[in-house]
């Protein structure tokens, strides 16, 4: 049966059965693929081979008791679950297919049921709308109709007592009427404001124009109001409002403006102009806070992201900044202050209106006194934050500056200068420098994050930044880290410059902080030990760094191997002008090294002086342009010359008693320290020495015309220079004494130096005197010199009686002026006799041995002849102030004869004895014969010796030459005695207090005895 057309046939939600069947079959296939894949991923262990026979399992296995491993069980379960699930789906499809065979009838029933429900809904809606119409018609009912007004309107067309509802627009006014109307309104408004209104002080800035009164509230708004009647009791009505701050939005026509006008008119009607001002004023203040809140959110989403936190609290705004910094938080609070005085008393000017105010909390503490002045006419949350942050950064930097300066205890070496700003945080900085470092540190604070930054960026500053940014109270604790950073930076600069300068850093010195502080007697933050080029391991140079800057110390180490402890530490007193102005550079390090080496040398020397009792004092000498080393300052030592030479038995009679020693540098390649000793000698002494010294090879000694003399000393590093100075002063004294002696005896000095003097004596004879380092004097003569025969005796005479064999074992010899004077006298007095001896030897062939001359001493010689056999003594003797030479015959008893004479048992020829007696009665130029010899003056002794030689040779026996050994032969059996060198200058004598040599021999009546001793002054 077909349904009528009024009943709608519903087919919207029908789905074809074929589509459903296709989807279920596809899902079954997909599910089977997934199950097989999952089963393949589960490995099954293989069964033992013994259980399989030809691929068939054991017959003893029961059903279901095959492979019971966990993976095999899981495979079976997955397959069973899949089969069960999809079996149920296909059963449902079977049910639906069976139901679908009767689907036509069921569809008709559904259509009928749907139509019945629609009809039921229509009946219900009709009843509802009837009731609703009744309710809405209630407002249109007129309970009391005005019949009188209706009749008047219907009959005349108007009713005077009815107000004009504006349904009919009035005729437009002309320009003249409009101008006249506005003028009238302006007059009415002016009269009312001046006479009838009691305006508060914040509304006294007003003006009237264009039919309205305009009130101006600076940085807030302009309000236009007007009145509709001359009656002062009629209310004002709102016309317009303009915002006087930026960003200030225009208020467009709409719901908000309508509500604002209604609220303003309500305030004007109820409270007048004051009420309207309070309403609009509070509205503007709230709006400003809202604008600042929006700006804060924009900052938090842009440049200040993650650094500020915005918290609106009622009508206030709280903005927290530097939220990532540890420690207590900082924020600003912007709110509305009522303006009421705390004491409740109102000023004669009237109550103060409410206004915006800012409270600043710095690290959890409110800052009462601050210079936060904001321009409320131009709202900028970023500028407000920058001002607050600038003041906060300034406070931190000023606190750091104060703590750094306080920690330095007023020492100007540590400088800290804070540059602050009350509006721009990027202009705030703290520049600090320790010492004269070329790398000053600049401390900055990031305005956004509040994190510290230090320039220049180095590994040291980066580590300090990290440590400071972890502090909870950075203004208080950061000064310690910055101080340490400055010290480390200065230490790094010193180590870098020292390495380039050539110093070696001593890393093996490991000392505790207590030991360091005890050794240097001050607080030590950083320290470094260096060893200069050419220094010995015993000494080191320490750079001590604290908040007073760097100080340099000389350190004497107790253990040279392990460098385990400090024996002594002494601070170097370097010129403050150099330390304060000169940065860490090669120039400063050179000054420090020079001062350190001078300190080491002077300290060692002062200790020796104290031990020896030599007065001394330290001083600083400035050598100006007039000297050899112009314009420099040198450390110096002043010593007493006599006390210095006292240990070696000398005195500074040739110069003033004060000696100054200046440090002149260090020769690292040789490890020698150079000092310059200078003093003042009389002009006559300096003139004598200067005439001879220009050609001298002693480059370490300089003598000027004005008497100033300079001595250059080279000593090993760390060793005192007292001994070298004593040696050079002794050499100068010896040289001066020797030259004075030569000058006194009219000897010509050809050249002179501290090591050698060359002079001439006689007609053309030359002698060289060498001064040895130990003070000894050695005489060198030409091979042809007559004095070559007694050279050893003359050398011993100059050295105080010591011969060469004794000089080798003596550490220091002290020749005196008397010894040198005796040498000069002996040289001149012995020249004639020695020249005569040389003439006798050179007058005869070398094959003839006669005579043999034996020098027993400077003033004692023996002449022995073998053909004829005889001997003579030539001795000097002093009587009064006159020196005489005595030649005596040795015809003496046999017990006093020589060994050869006794062995031969020969007697002298009678004719020779008679000839000698005749000679003793003769006289010549400068000599006279006596009873048994000849007495001659120094000038005549040569002729006497030659006359004696002629006489003796005239009695020689012919044919005896072959029996006489040749001169220089080696037959000891023939020689009568061996020539022996005497050790003492004057045998069998002693030196008396007056410097004369006295003897103990007995004199004869008519001449000098064999045993007489001659004294030479």
Image: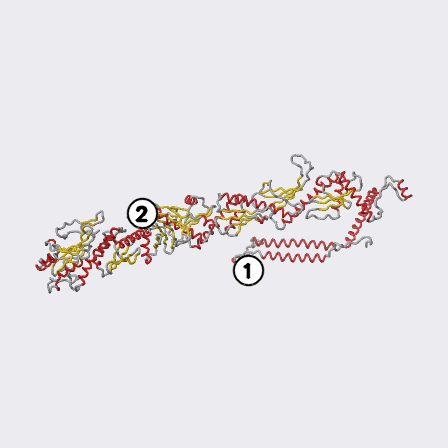
Q: Position of residue 654 (x, y in %)?
A: 31, 50
Q: Are marks 1 and 2 in contact (CB under 8 Å)?
A: no
Q: Position of residue 788 (x, y in %)?
A: 22, 59
**Front position among marks 1 and 2:** 2
Tell whether 824 sits left or right of 620. left
Tell whether 489 sits left or right of 258. left
Which element carries disc 2, helix, strand or loop? helix
Q: Which residue is mark 1?
A: 55
- Outermost residue on the right side: it is 155
Regarding residue 615, the answer to whether it shows in the image is yes
Regarding residue 506, the answer to whether it shows in the image is no
Q: Position of residue 307 (x, y in %)?
A: 60, 48
Quadrant placement of the N terminus: bottom right
Which element carries disc 1, helix, strand or loop? loop
Upstream in sequence: badge 1 or badge 2: 1
Q: Which residue is mark 2?
A: 642
Above/below status of 259 relative to 895: above
Above/below status of 615 relative to 740: above
Tell whether 215 sits left or right of 656. right
Q: Nearer the viewer, residue 832 or 845?
A: 832
Q: Position of residue 839 (x, y in %)?
A: 18, 61
């Amino acid at each position: 049966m077909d349904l009528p057309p009024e009943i709608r046939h519903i087919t919207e939600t029908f789905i074809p059965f074929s589509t459903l069947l296709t989807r279920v079959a596809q899902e079954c296939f997909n599910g089977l693929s997934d199950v097989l894949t999952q089963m393949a991923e589960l490995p099954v262990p293989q069964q033992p081979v013994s259980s399989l026979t030809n691929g068939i399992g054991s017959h003893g296995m029961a059903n279901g008791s095959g492979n019971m491993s966990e993976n095999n069980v899981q495979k079976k379960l997955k397959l069973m679950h899949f089969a069960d699930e999809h079996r149920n789906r296909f059963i449902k499809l079977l049910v639906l297919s069976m139901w679908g065979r009767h689907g036509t009838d069921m569809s008709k029933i559904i259509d009928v049921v749907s139509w019945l429900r629609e009809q039921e809904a229509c009946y219900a809606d009709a009843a509802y709308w009837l009731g609703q119409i009744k309710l809405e018609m209630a407002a249109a009912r007129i309970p009391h109709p005005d019949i009188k007004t209706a009749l008047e309107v219907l009959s005349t067309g108007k009713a005077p007592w009815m107000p004009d509802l504006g349904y009919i627009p009035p005729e437009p006014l002309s320009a003249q009427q409009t101008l006249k109307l506005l003028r009238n309104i302006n007059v009415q408004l002016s009269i009312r404001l001046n006479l009838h209104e009691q305006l508060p002080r914040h509304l006294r800035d007003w003006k009237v124009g264009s039919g309205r009164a305009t009130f101006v509230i600076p940085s807030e708004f302009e309000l236009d109001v007007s009145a509709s009647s001359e009656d002062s009791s009629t209310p004002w009505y709102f016309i317009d409002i303009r915002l006087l701050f930026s960003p200030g939005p225009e208020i467009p026509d709409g719901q908000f403006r309508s509500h604002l006008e209604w609220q303003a008119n309500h305030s004007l009607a109820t409270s007048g102009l004051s009420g309207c001002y309070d309403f609009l004023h509070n509205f503007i203040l709230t709006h400003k806070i809202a604008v600042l809140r929006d700006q804060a959110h924009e900052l938090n989403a842009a440049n200040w992201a993650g650094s500020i936190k915005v918290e609106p609290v009622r009508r206030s705004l709280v903005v927290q900044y530097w939220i990532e910094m540890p420690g207590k938080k900082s924020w600003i609070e912007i709110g509305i202050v009522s303006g009421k005085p705390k004491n409740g008393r109102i000023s004669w000017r009237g109550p103060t209106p409410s206004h915006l105010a800012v409270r600043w909390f710095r690290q959890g503490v409110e800052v009462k006194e601050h210079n936060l002045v904001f321009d409320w006419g131009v709202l900028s949350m970023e500028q407000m934050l920058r001002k607050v942050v600038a003041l906060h950064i300034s406070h931190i930097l000023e606190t750091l500056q104060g703590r750094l300066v306080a920690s330095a205890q007023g020492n100007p070496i540590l400088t800290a200068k804070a540059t602050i700003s009350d509006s721009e945080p990027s202009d705030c900085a703290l520049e600090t420098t320790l010492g004269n470092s070329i790398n000053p540190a600049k401390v900055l604070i990031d305005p956004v994050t509040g994190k510290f930054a230090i320039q220049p960026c180095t590994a040291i500053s980066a580590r300090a930044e990290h440590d400071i940014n972890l502090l909870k109270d950075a203004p208080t604790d950061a000064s310690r880290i910055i101080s340490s950073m400055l010290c480390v930076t200065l230490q790094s600069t010193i180590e870098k410059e020292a390495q380039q300068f050539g110093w070696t850093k001593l890393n093996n010195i490991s000392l505790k902080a207590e030991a360091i502080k005890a050794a240097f007697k001050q607080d030590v933050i950083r320290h470094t030990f260096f060893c200069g080029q050419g220094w010995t391991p015993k000494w080191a140079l320490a750079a001590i760094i604290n908040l007073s800057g760097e100080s340099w110390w000389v350190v004497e180490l107790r253990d040279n191997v392990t460098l385990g402890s400090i024996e002594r530490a002494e601070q170097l007193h370097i010129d403050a002008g150099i330390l304060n102005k000169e940065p860490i550079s090669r120039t400063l390090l050179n000054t420090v090294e020079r001062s350190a080496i001078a300190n080491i040398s002077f300290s060692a020397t002062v200790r020796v002086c104290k031990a020896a009792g030599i007065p001394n004092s330290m001083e600083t000498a400035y050598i100006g342009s007039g000297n050899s080393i112009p314009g420099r300052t040198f450390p110096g030592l002043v010593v007493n010359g006599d006390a210095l030479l006292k240990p070696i038995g000398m005195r500074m009679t040739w110069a003033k008693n004060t000696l100054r020693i200046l440090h002149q540098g260090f020769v690292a390649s040789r490890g020698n320290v150079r000092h310059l000793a200078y003093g003042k000698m009389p002009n006559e002494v300096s003139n004598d020495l200067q005439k001879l010294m220009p050609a001298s090879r002693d480059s370490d000694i300089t003598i000027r015309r004005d008497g100033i003399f300079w001595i250059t000393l080279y000593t090993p590093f760390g060793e005192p220079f007292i001994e070298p100075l004593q040696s050079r002063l002794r050499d100068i004294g010896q040289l001066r004494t020797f030259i004075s002696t030569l000058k006194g005896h009219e000897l010509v000095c050809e050249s002179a130096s501290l090591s050698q003097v060359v002079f001439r004596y006689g007609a053309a004879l030359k002698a060289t005197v060498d001064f040895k380092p130990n003070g000894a004097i050695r005489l060198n003569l030409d091979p042809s010199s007559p004095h070559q025969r007694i050279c050893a005796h003359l050398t011993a005479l100059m050295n105080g009686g010591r011969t060469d064999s004794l000089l080798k074992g003596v550490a220091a010899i002290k020749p005196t002026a008397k010894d040198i004077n005796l040498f000069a006298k002996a040289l001149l007095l012995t020249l004639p006799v020695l020249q005569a001896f040389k003439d006798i030897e050179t007058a005869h062939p070398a094959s003839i041995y006669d005579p043999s001359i034996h020098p027993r001493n400077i003033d004692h010689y023996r002449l022995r002849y073998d053909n004829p056999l005889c001997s003579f003594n030539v001795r000097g003797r002093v009587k009064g102030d006159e020196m005489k030479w005595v030649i005596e015959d040795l015809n003496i008893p046999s017990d006093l004869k020589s060994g050869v004479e006794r062995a031969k048992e020969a007697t002298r020829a009678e004719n020779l004895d008679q000839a000698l007696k005749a000679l003793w009665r003769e006289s010549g130029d400068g000599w006279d014969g006596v009873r048994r010899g000849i007495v001659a003056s120094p000038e005549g002794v040569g002729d006497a010796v030659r006359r004696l030689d002629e006489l003796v040779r005239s009695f020689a026996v012919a044919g005896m030459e072959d029996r006489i050994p040749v001169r220089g032969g080696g037959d000891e059996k023939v020689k009568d005695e061996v020539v022996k060198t005497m050790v003492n200058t004057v045998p069998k004598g002693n030196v008396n207090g007056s410097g004369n040599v006295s003897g103990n021999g007995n004199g004869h009546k008519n001449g000098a005895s064999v045993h007489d001793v001659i004294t030479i002054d």
